[in-house]
């Protein structure tokens, strides 16, 4: 696909200023865990091809959840951003996207308790907000396994984790990204601090809503100190249950988080709708209720994600529930998704069995429309 402008009708194809970048359309490629690294979690040529295929002029991609430190892994094969080799690998990706005239942000991520001793330095226990079991599976070098028991982060260790996000932000800038997004959703470390189903702390990072939001805000502050607010986004999943997450008063919790994030003048807030659990749409026909609620509180742009089709995406923008819409499953299966939406072309079907790990199958071999 060339770097010529793609024109379509409807709100999705209206240009938009998103923080420091100017977009030609509002179709965002969601951050998608694909686990295609082979050696030392370094982005490779297959990943370069994958992102390049899906880049469009004036379009935004959010790169997959990328681990900020050795303790942050939960899915073997997911990329890192904590070594110079990681930077070199990602540079090839950002260069390919920019050659198409596209923009790309890097999503920074720490799995927290969603991990296994096989993925931890020295076989140590995974870390989390509190020692609350994660009764789900994670992907290890020897396959899918139940997560290992985790331990609670000591309060003296928290500053070091924040420093990991700061350093990862610096490395993302060296790698040529246009900005960074904090993964505060889907039951990973930031979310584990936010929600009281997993945060049982009695110190200044636990108990009250204000205390549980503290870690999120401190990490965002570190990222903004590197990039400026207009090149930083935050992803949250209000009422999301993926990763066995729960909160006694999610509406109050996430309203407070969104209100506090206003102080950073972020590029956007990226909201995962609760109708989606992981990569599966569990509640068909449910409107983007989380975006509707936080729209009243958060002052800057909102990206809504989770189970959208082109009709519902246009509707969400038309109604003012969101400014942009992120697509995941359809972007996996359609490298030319933006063109297909612009021209009303049929979509390839996605193969869920090839979403996580593997080779080019189900990754870079989906055909462009012209190839069919």
Image (cartoon, rainbow, N blue to C red):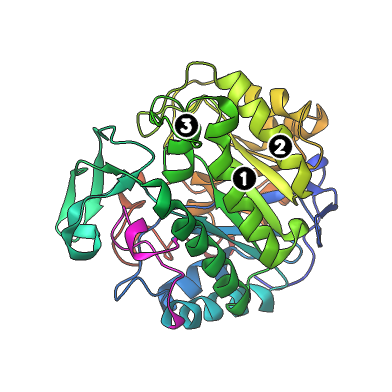
Q: CA distance from mark 1 to mark 2?
A: 8 Å
- Badge 1: few (under 14), some or many (20 or more) residues near its Cα, within 10 Å? some
- Which disc is residue 260 wearing? 2
Name the element at disc 1: helix
Say if 308 sits above or below 207 in the image. below
In the image, the segment drawn in magenta is 67-84
| Number of on-image labels | 3
Quadrant containing the N terminus is bottom right
Residue 86, given in percent of the width and then of the height, sits at 44, 77
Q: Which residue is mark 1?
A: 217
Q: Tell me which corner region of the image, top left, top right, bottom left or bottom right, holds residue 279.
A: top left
Mark 3–mark 2 CB contact (< 8 Å): no
Does residue 306 appear in the picture of this structure?
no
| Residue 171 lies in quadrant | bottom right
Disc on the earlier residue, 1 or 2: 1
The reply to whether discs 1 and 2 touch (Cβ–Cβ < 8 Å) is: yes
Question: Residue 326, position in %: x, y?
Answer: 62, 45
**3 vs 2, front mark:** 3
Residue 37 locus on image (x, y percent): 35, 69
- Position of 240 compared to 286: left or right? left
Placement of 57 over or under 254, stated as above or below:
below
Q: Earlier in the sequence, mark 1 or mark 3?
A: 3
């Amino acid at each position: 696909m060339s770097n010529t402008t793609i024109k379509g009708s409807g709100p999705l194809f209206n240009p938009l200023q998103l923080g420091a970048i100017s977009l030609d359309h509002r179709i965002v490629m969601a951050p998608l865990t694909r686990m295609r690294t082979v050696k030392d979690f370094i982005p490779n040529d297959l990943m370069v091809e994958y992102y390049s295929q899906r880049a469009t002029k004036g379009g935004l991609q959010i790169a997959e959840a990328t681990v900020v430190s050795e303790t942050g892994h939960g899915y073997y094969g997911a990329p890192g951003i904590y070594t110079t080799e990681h930077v070199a690998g990602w540079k090839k990706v950002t260069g390919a996207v920019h050659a198409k005239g596209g923009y790309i942000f890097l999503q920074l991520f720490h799995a927290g308790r969603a991990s296994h001793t096989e993925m931890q330095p020295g076989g140590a226990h995974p870390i989390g907000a509190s020692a609350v079991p994660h009764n789900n599976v994670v992907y290890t070098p020897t396959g899918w396994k139940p997560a290992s028991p985790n331990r609670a982060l000591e309060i003296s260790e928290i500053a070091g984790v924040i420093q990991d996000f700061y350093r990862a932000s610096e490395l993302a800038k060296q790698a040529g990204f246009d900005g960074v997004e904090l993964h505060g959703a889907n039951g990973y470390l930031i979310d584990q601090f936010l929600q009281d189903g997993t945060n049982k702390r009695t110190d200044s990072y636990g108990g009250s809503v204000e205390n549980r939001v503290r870690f999120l805000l401190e990490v965002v502050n570190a990222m903004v100190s590197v990039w400026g607010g207009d090149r930083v986004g935050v992803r949250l999943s209000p009422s999301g249950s993926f990763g066995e997450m729960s909160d006694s008063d999610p509406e109050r919790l996430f309203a407070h988080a969104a209100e506090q994030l206003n102080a950073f003048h972020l590029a956007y807030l990226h909201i995962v709708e609760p109708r989606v659990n992981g990569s599966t749409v569990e509640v068909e026909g449910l409107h983007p209720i989380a975006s509707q609620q936080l729209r009243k509180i958060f002052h800057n742009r909102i990206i809504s994600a989770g189970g959208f089709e082109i009709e519902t995406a246009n509707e969400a923008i038309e109604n003012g529930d969101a400014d942009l819409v992120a697509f995941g499953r359809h972007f996996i299966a359609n490298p030319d998704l933006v063109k297909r939406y612009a021209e009303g072309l049929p979509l390839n079907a996605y193969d869920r069995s090839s979403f996580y790990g593997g080779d080019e199958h189900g990754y870079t071999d989906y055909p462009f429309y012209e190839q069919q």
